[in-house]
């Protein structure tokens, strides 16, 4: 294994690289079955989606295009503020398009509940929500993913795109940080 200066900060691994690869391949296949012939638009929620989305679109050999939005309800903290702000809006018309929302983690549901309403308002023909991780124990909004990679316990997780204070996104697996990292 390659040496990593972040390794010392990781308490435990929740999902290994191998399990991520295997599951992403399954999700790609499932999306292909659902959306073949529909020329979907994959819409990633920045920044957390970037690693997962890169793997997912390649695991799913659909004819498609990609788009990104940036939304924030987290302000460098591990709890949601409950309010969603669009910091990067759509750069194209999505009316009539079959959308695949690609999210890193579905937690309280605040972000995706907001986004789904927004995209329906913009005239999307259909919306398929794919989340890498699902934390159903924390849900406060009535929203579920159409496809979810892994269910995770109520712990703050990092890696494979997910951050703590913008760091650890390049950890190649999903892990939990040591408590002393949060206390700084
Ligand atoms: P909500 O609560 O709106 O949260 O469903 C979705 C967004 O919150 C971020 N989030 C996390 N980020 N580790 C992270 O790095 C976590 O454990 C975590 N839980 C929520 C994430 O950006 C997600 O899009
Ligand atoms: Mg996110």
Image (cartoon, helix red, strand yellow):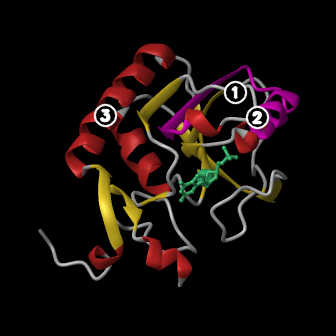
Q: Which residues are magenta?
A: 114-135
The image position of residue 98, as x and y in percent, is 64, 24
Percent across and percent down for residue 72 are: 74, 58
Task: State yes or no: Cβ of the residue under disc 2 lies below 8 Å from any atom of ligand 1.
Answer: yes
- Where residue 53 appears, as percent x and y from the top left, is 46, 47
Q: Nearer the viewer, residue 134 or 35?
A: 134
Q: Which label number is shown at residue 113?
A: 2
Confirm whether the magenta stretch covers residue 121: yes
Q: Nearer the viewer, residue 115 or 180?
A: 180
Under circle 3, the secondary element is helix
Q: Secondary structure at mark 1?
A: loop
| Residue with the mark numbered 3 | 23
Task: For the residues labelled 2 and 1, say whether their Cβ atoms are less than 8 Å apart.
Answer: yes
User: Which residue is at a point 76% across and 32% down the rendered structure image?
Assistant: 141
Residue 73 visible? The answer is yes
In the depicted structure, whether residue 158 falls above or below residue 56: below
List the residue tagged with mark 1: 143
């Amino acid at each position: 294994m390659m040496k990593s200066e972040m390794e010392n900060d990781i308490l435990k691994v929740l999902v290994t690289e191998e399990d991520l690869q295997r599951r992403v391949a399954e999700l790609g296949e499932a999306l292909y079955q659902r959306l073949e012939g529909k020329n979907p638009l994959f819409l990633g929620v920045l920044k957390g989606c970037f690693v997962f989305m890169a793997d997912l679109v390649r695991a799913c050999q659909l004819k498609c295009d990609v788009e990104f939005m940036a939304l924030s309800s987290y302000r460098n903290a591990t709890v949601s503020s409950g309010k969603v702000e669009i910091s990067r809006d759509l750069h194209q018309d999505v009316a009539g398009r079959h959308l695949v929302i690609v999210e890193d983690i579905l937690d309280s549901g605040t972000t995706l509940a907001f986004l789904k309403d927004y995209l329906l308002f913009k005239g999307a023909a259909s919306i398929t929500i794919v989340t890498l991780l699902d934390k159903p124990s924390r849900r406060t909004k009535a929203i579920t993913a159409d496809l979810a990679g892994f269910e995770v316990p109520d712990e703050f997780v990092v890696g494979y795109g997910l951050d703590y204070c913008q760091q650890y996104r390049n950890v190649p697996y999903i892990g939990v940080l040591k408590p002393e990292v949060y206390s700084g």
